[in-house]
């Protein structure tokens, strides 16, 4: 049993809504993953992943949430807390957006809301791991007060580990 509060699963910002996954998100989520990995995912595989994520949220009290633009109502990516390379006590913040919406500050806005949600759980520290090549993501984390901890080598290249104390 976790000693932390469950992360709020409905987050709103000036321009964005983050909410729990629904089955109808599977096709858009699949499109986002395929944009990154050249079409290696199927909608059925993504549906299974969504079911696993919802089960994990019930166990861990943390979640990765879809991001919708408030005015347009469209799915543009995801943001949230994951165990990833870290732990449930000190989870990672993760986000990914469709390329068509890059450069509008949405990642920073969504991650800021998730940071506040992490504070509400009572956690003391978050992590993030980002490919060293991913300058835009590193900029987002810098704006949110994350600091470099170390760099590791993995099969896909250098990974920068960043951390941020809460609140």
Image (cartoon, rainbow, N blue to C red):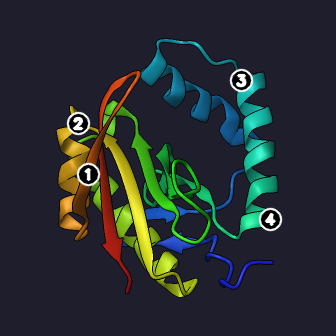
The answer to whether marks 1 and 4 mark residues whose Cβ atoms lie closer than 8 Å is no
| Label 3, label 2: how far apart the Cα atoms are | 30 Å
Seen at 18% across and 61% down, the residue is: 142
Residue 78 pos. (x, y %): 50, 49
Please rate how many residues cluster around mark 4, counting C-alpha atoms within 10 Å: few if below 14, some from 14 to 19, many from 20. few
Mark 3 vs mark 4: give the one in front. 4
The answer to whether marks 1 and 2 mark residues whose Cβ atoms lie closer than 8 Å is no
Mark 1 vs mark 4: give the one in front. 1
Seen at 58% across and 72% down, the residue is: 89
Which residue is under mark 4?
58
- Closer-to-camera residue (157/82): 157
Mark 3 vs mark 1: give the one in front. 1
Q: Is residue 53 left or right of residue 116?
A: right
Which residue is under mark 2?
132
Which residue is under mark 1?
150
| Label 1, label 4: how far apart the Cα atoms are | 31 Å
- Closer-to-camera residue (140/26): 140
The answer to whether marks 2 and 4 mark residues whose Cβ atoms lie closer than 8 Å is no
Q: Earlier in the sequence, mark 1 or mark 2?
A: 2
For residue 15, say whether it is visible.
no
Task: Identify the element where label 3 is drawn.
Answer: helix
- Closer-to-camera residue (68/65): 65
Task: Identify the element where label 1 is drawn.
Answer: strand
Q: Earlier in the sequence, mark 1 or mark 4?
A: 4
The answer to whether marks 3 and 1 mark residues whose Cβ atoms lie closer than 8 Å is no
Image quadrant in which the N terminus is located: bottom right
Which residue is under mark 3?
43
Image quadrant in which the C terminus is located: bottom left
């Amino acid at each position: 049993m976790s000693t932390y509060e469950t992360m709020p699963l409905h987050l709103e910002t000036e321009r964005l809504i983050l909410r729990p996954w629904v089955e109808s998100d599977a096709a858009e989520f699949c499109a986002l993953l395929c944009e990154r990995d050249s079409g290696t995912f199927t909608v059925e595989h993504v549906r299974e992943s969504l079911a696993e994520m919802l089960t994990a949220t019930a166990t861990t009290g943390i979640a990765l949430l879809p991001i919708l633009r408030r005015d347009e109502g469209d799915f543009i990516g995801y943001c949230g807390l994951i165990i990833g390379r870290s732990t449930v006590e000190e989870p990672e913040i993760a986000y990914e957006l469709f390329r068509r919406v890059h450069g509008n500050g949405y990642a920073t806005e969504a991650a800021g809301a998730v940071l506040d949600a992490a504070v509400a759980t009572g956690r003391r520290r978050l992590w993030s791991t980002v490919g060293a090549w991913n300058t835009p993501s590193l900029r987002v984390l810098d704006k949110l007060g994350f600091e470099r901890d170390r760099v590791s080598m993995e099969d896909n290249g250098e990974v920068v580990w960043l951390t941020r104390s809460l609140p």
